[in-house]
Image (cartoon, helix red, strand yellow):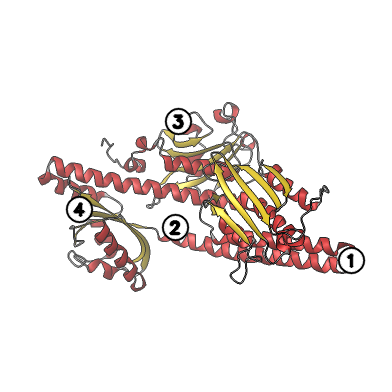
Amino acid sequence: MTGSPTRPGEPLAVYEIEGLSGDPELERLVRFAAELCGCPTALVSLVDETHQRFVAKVGLQANETPRSMSFCAHAMVENCVMEVPDARLDPRFCDNPLVTGAPHIRFYAGAPLVSPQGAPLGSVCVISPEPRVALSDHQRSGLTVLADAVMSRLEARRVLLTKQAWEEAAEADPAASEKRFRVLADAMPQMVWSTRPDGYHDYYNARWYEFTGARPGDTEGNGWNGQFHPDDQAHAWDLWRRSLETGEPYEVEYRLRRFDGQYRWTLGRALPIRDEHGKITRWFGTCTEIHEQRLLSEDKDLVSRELSHRIKNIFQVIGSMIRLSSRGEPTLKAYGLKLSEQVTALGRAYDYVRVQEGTSAMTLQGMLREVFGAYNMNGVERVRIHGEEVFLSEHVMTPLALTFHELATNAAKYGALTSSTGTIDLTITRHDDLLQFEWEESGSLVLHSTERRGFGSELIAASIERQLGGRFTREWLPTGLKATATIPFVEDGAV
C-alpha cells in the first residue's frame, strides 16, 4: 500500500481518495442519486485546498476541476442540501466557466459530506442543464441519506487503511512499529483501542482518556463496557462476543459516558489483524462521536413519522369525501366507489413504502402483497405471486400499485375472483434490462372480453406505458384473462 501522510488541514488525506476512483459502491450511489432526482449528472465530489475531485460520477467526463469553479465547495459548509435553481441568476455562479460553458450547469443540488469530527469534505450532488424550481421533500431527504451512505463508505475505508498500515509496519520492523503506532494513534481525532486475540483490551490512545476521563488502566480488560450507558451494555457485549467468535468486523452504536457524566452517542468499529495463516493476532478499533448526527437523524425520523401519519389521514379523508359525494348521485355511485378503492390502494402502497424509509429501494413483492391483501384472507391465497424478489425505487411503486389494483378489482367483478375457486397467478421475471409481469386468471365464471377502453384501461396505459415507458397487452384465453406488462429495468430499479 502506498499512502500520503496526514498533514494538518488536510482531512481528506486519511481516506487516500486517489484509490477511490471507480469504487463500485460509490458508483451505485451516484447512479441512484441521478435517478432519484431526475438529473442527468450526479457526483461524489471531494474538495481539497486547490481542487474538487469526482471519485464517483455519472453523466460527466471530467475527473476534477479547480476549487475556484466548485459548487460543492459551497455546499459542503451548509447544514442541509444546498439548491441552486438557475445558476445564471445566482451571483456566486453566474460567471462560473461551468455555467457559461460546458457542461452548462443550470440546476444544482448538493448534500454536504462531513467527517465525524465535523470537517467538511465535499458533497453528493446532482446537476442538470435545465433550470428547476426545487427538489421535492422526498428527493431532498434521499440525497441526505445518500450522503450519509457515502460517509459510511469513506469511514470504513479509513479504518481499513489504518489497519493495513499497522500490519505493514509490524511486518517491516516489529520493535519500532509499536512506538510509531502509539504516536499515530495519539494524533488521531478518534478514540483508538486495541486488544489481544481473545478480546482483552490492553491499549487506548490519549483521546480515549481525554474523552472518558478514565484513568490509565481503569478500562483495560472488560472495564470498557462500564463506560457505556446501562441500556447499551448488553447489546455491545453480544456484538463483541460474536465478532470474537466469528472473526467478523465489529460495529455498534452506543452511548459513551463523557468525563462530565453526559452520555454521548458513539460509533464503535473494529477489524481483526491476521497473520499469514489467517490467525487473528490483534483487534484494532476506533470510537467516533456521532451524537449530533444521531440526534438530527432522530429528529428527521420523528418529522417523517408525523408527516406519514398526516398523509395517511389525507388518503382516508379523500376516500371518504369521494364516497359521500357520490352517494347522492346514483349515476356517479359506481364510479365513486371505484375511485375510492383506488385511493385506498394508493394509501396501502404508500404505507408500505414509508415503513421502509431510509433504504434506497423497496421490495415489489412486499408492496403487491399489501395490494392483494383483501383477496388473500383466512389462509386462502387467491392471488399468488411467483418469481424472484425485486427491489424498486419508490417512484415506480405507485403506478404499479394502481395497475395491479385495477386488474384485481376487475377480476373480482368480471373475472377469476367472481368464483370461489378462481385464482390468479402473477409471475415476475427479469430479462436483462427488462422486467416482465404475467397475470393469468383461471377458474373464471365470466369469460368474455370487451373492446371498450374505459377508465381502468386508461389508468393502466398511463401507469405502464406513459409513466414507466413500458408496454401492456391483454388477451382472453379459454381459461381466463392473460395480461402482460413489460417495463425497463436497471440495477437500482425501473426507470
Q: Are marks 1 and 4 in contact (CB under 8 Å)?
A: no
Q: Nearer the viewer, residue 5 or 276?
A: 276
The residue that label 4 is drawn on is 280
Q: Are marks 1 and 2 in contact (CB under 8 Å)?
A: no
Callout 3: helix, strand or loop? Answer: loop
The residue that label 2 is drawn on is 293
Q: CA distance from mark 1 to mark 4?
A: 77 Å
Residue drawn at (59%, 33%) of the image: 105
The three-letter code of the residue at mark 1 reads Pro
Q: Are marks 2 and 3 in contact (CB under 8 Å)?
A: no
Across and down, in percent, residue 86 comes to 64, 38
Instruction: Locate residue 35: give its quadrant.
Output: top right
Callout 4: helix, strand or loop? Answer: strand
Mark 2 or mark 3: name the one nearer the start of the chain: 3
Q: Nearer the viewer, residue 428 or 149?
A: 428
Foreground mark, 1 or 3, reads 1
The residue that label 3 is drawn on is 63
Q: Nearer the viewer, residue 96 or 353?
A: 353
The three-letter code of the residue at mark 3 reads Asn
Callout 1: helix, strand or loop? Answer: helix
Residue drawn at (82%, 60%) of the image: 335
Mark 3 or mark 4: name the one nearer the start of the chain: 3
Question: Which residue reaches farthest left?
Answer: 175
Q: Quadrant of the N terminus?
A: top left
Foreground mark, 2 or 4, reads 4
Question: Which residue reaches farthest top?
Answer: 101
Across and down, in percent, residue 135 comes to 62, 47
Q: Are marks 3 and 4 in contact (CB under 8 Å)?
A: no
In the drawing, what numbered circle is on residue 330?
1
